[in-house]
Amino acid sequence: MGHGWEGVVLKLMRGKDYEFTVTGVEQITEHYRRVSCTDGGMLAATGVHPTMWVRLWFDDNGRPHQRAYTLVEPDPATGTFHLEFALHDGCASRWARAARPGDRIQATVQGTGFPLPHPPPGHLLAVGDCASLPAVNSLLAALPGTPAQVWLETQHDTDAELPVGPDDGSCRVRRVARRRGGADLVAEVRSALTAMTPAELADAYLWFTCDTATTRALAQLARKELGLARGQLHALGYWRP
């Protein structure tokens, strides 16, 4: 399967193509699935950094469709990693549900760099959902021991079973059921942030990776209402409702 015009654009932007091979699958919950892969030589060529992601190519009724996924536990020495899928309708979830050892999938690496905040923040405030959970966990692992507050928006009861952050006591997790298109999550995070002192906010790093509308609302809160510096905030919408 060709990659269409999107593939052409990524090539012009120096994207590099690889082929991954499925080595195992694990159903974490009814709505969350892990697929283990070998990397086709990618990690040896690119190296690894926190929240590293790739674009996977899926067949959408005969047309190429790409979606970005964070690598979980990438290991350059063995050339292996995992991919985690929050299952819903769509060609990516269909592929994940059907994936079996030996299956192959094409991928493109482009634009995945992420510099950790420097100096390290006094505390981390992260807001995400099951789609961005691998990236949230990667960020937490890259800042070991940093006190963290995570808000995780959930859509299913079984989402409570998904592991968030280390179990060393440095991370507090608040799960918020998705209601009113993410408005309940925004309201809860707003209440917490506006209750913080200027000194606490100045020492914080904020990471917002929800659906596009929720992420935009949280970013506006941080920048326009709270006046946080650009280097204190990472905001990226992971999906559209």
Image (cartoon, grey):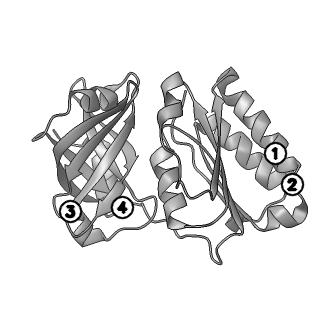
Q: Amino acid at mark 3?
A: Gly
Quick check: 193 left or right of 106?
A: right
Inter-mark Cα distance, 4 to 1 = 40 Å
Inter-mark Cα distance, 3 to 2 = 43 Å
Residue designated by label 3 = 79
Mark 4: secondary structure: loop
Quick check: 87 left or right of 19?
A: right
Mark 2: secondary structure: loop
Inter-mark Cα distance, 2 to 4 = 41 Å
Mark 3 in CB contact with mark 1 (< 8 angstroms) = no
**Mark with earlier residue (2, 4):** 4
Mark 4 in CB contact with mark 1 (< 8 angstroms) = no
**Mark with earlier residue (3, 2):** 3
**Mark with earlier residue (4, 1):** 4
**Crowd band around label 4 with a 10 angstrom C-alpha radius: few (<14), some (14–19), many (20+):** few
Specify the label residue 13 is tagged with.
Answer: 4
Quick check: 211 left or right of 50?
A: right
Image quarter where the C terminus lies is top right
The quadrant where residue 198 appears: bottom right
Mark 2 in CB contact with mark 1 (< 8 angstroms) = yes
Q: Amino acid at mark 2?
A: Met
Residue designated by label 1 = 192
**Crowd band around label 2 with a 10 angstrom C-alpha radius: few (<14), some (14–19), many (20+):** few
Tell which residue pokes out farthest to the front in this image.
Answer: 168
**Mark with earlier residue (3, 4):** 4
Quick check: 152 left or right of 60?
A: right
Mark 1: secondary structure: helix
Front residue of this view, candidates 123 and 241? 123
Seen in the picture, residue 220 relative to 175 is either above or below; the reply is below
Residue designated by label 2 = 196
Tell me where residue 128 appears, x and y as whole percent.
58, 43
Seen in the picture, residue 219 relative to 64 is either above or below; the reply is below
